[in-house]
Image (cartoon, rainbow, N blue to C red):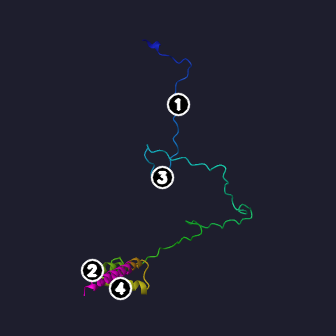
Amino acid sequence: MGGGDKPKDFSGEHNHPPPPQPYPPPQYGTFQGASTYPPPPPVPQPAMGFPHPVPPPGATEASAPPPPPYYGCQAVQGYPVAEGRPVRERRLPCCGLGCGWCLFILGFFLAAIPWYVGAIIVLCSRIDPREKPGYIACAIAAVLATIAIILGVTKGADDW
């Protein structure tokens, strides 16, 4: 077979491959999924034939008051942004834990007496809001210890 066996394109046009199909726009997010995962379902169109909601009368009138002016660069309009030097709070006592949590931990070793002290402190005095969870834990532990003591004492009452 010679060179003349191949069909020649006499029209002068060259055979170009078809242009590549454009990719869909990227979906922004933290996880795009595997390439074998099916694409998300299309956004449904509103149903035809149902009455659509309309704004209440008077909402589209031109006599509506303009929105209040926006001053400055605020994170949420209407909420002030605190500017200036940050306030430093004092360090919590007892190695930074706070007295409430120290009383709670000591209550396991000292027969629940520190739990009652913490419960009395939380009920009768003003405390730092950062220490409140420790004192609340003491109060709950004191109630549970009281229930355990009462059930333990009355358990052997029938024996005499």
Residue 6 location in percent, x, y? 47, 16
**Residue 73 in the figure: left or right of residue 106:** right
Residue 56 location in percent, x, y? 70, 62
Counting residues from the start of the chain, the first of labels 1 and 4 encountered is 1
Q: Is residue 136 visible?
A: yes
- Residue labelled with disc 2: 109
Q: Gap in Å between the C-alphas at discs 2 and 4? A: 14 Å
Q: Residue at x 59, y 69 (%)?
A: 78
Q: Main secondary structure of the magenta part?
A: helix
Please state which amino acid type lies under the numbered disc 2: Phe
Determine whether the residue tagged by mark 1 lies in a helix, strand or loop.
loop
| Residue 18 circle label | 1
Please state which amino acid type lies under the numbered disc 4: Val
Determine whether the residue tagged by mark 4 lies in a helix, strand or loop.
helix
- Density class for disc 3 (Cα within 10 Å; few <14, some 14-19, many ≥20) is few
Q: Which residues are magenta?
A: 137-160
Residue 111 location in percent, x, y? 28, 83
Q: In this rendering, which labeled residue sits more in front, label 2 or label 1? A: 2
**Quadrant of the rendering where the C terminus is positioned:** bottom left
Mark 2 and mark 4 residues within 8 Å of each other at the beta carbon: no
Counting residues from the start of the chain, the first of labels 3 and 4 encountered is 3
- Density class for disc 1 (Cα within 10 Å; few <14, some 14-19, many ≥20) is few
Counting residues from the start of the chain, the first of labels 3 and 1 encountered is 1
- Residue labelled with disc 4: 117
- Density class for disc 4 (Cα within 10 Å; few <14, some 14-19, many ≥20) is some
Q: Residue at x 58, y 49 (%)?
A: 44
| Residue 29 circle label | 3
**Residue 94 in the figure: left or right of residue 12:** left
- In the image, 159 versus 26, the foreground residue is 159
Q: Gap in Å between the C-alphas at discs 3 and 4? A: 52 Å
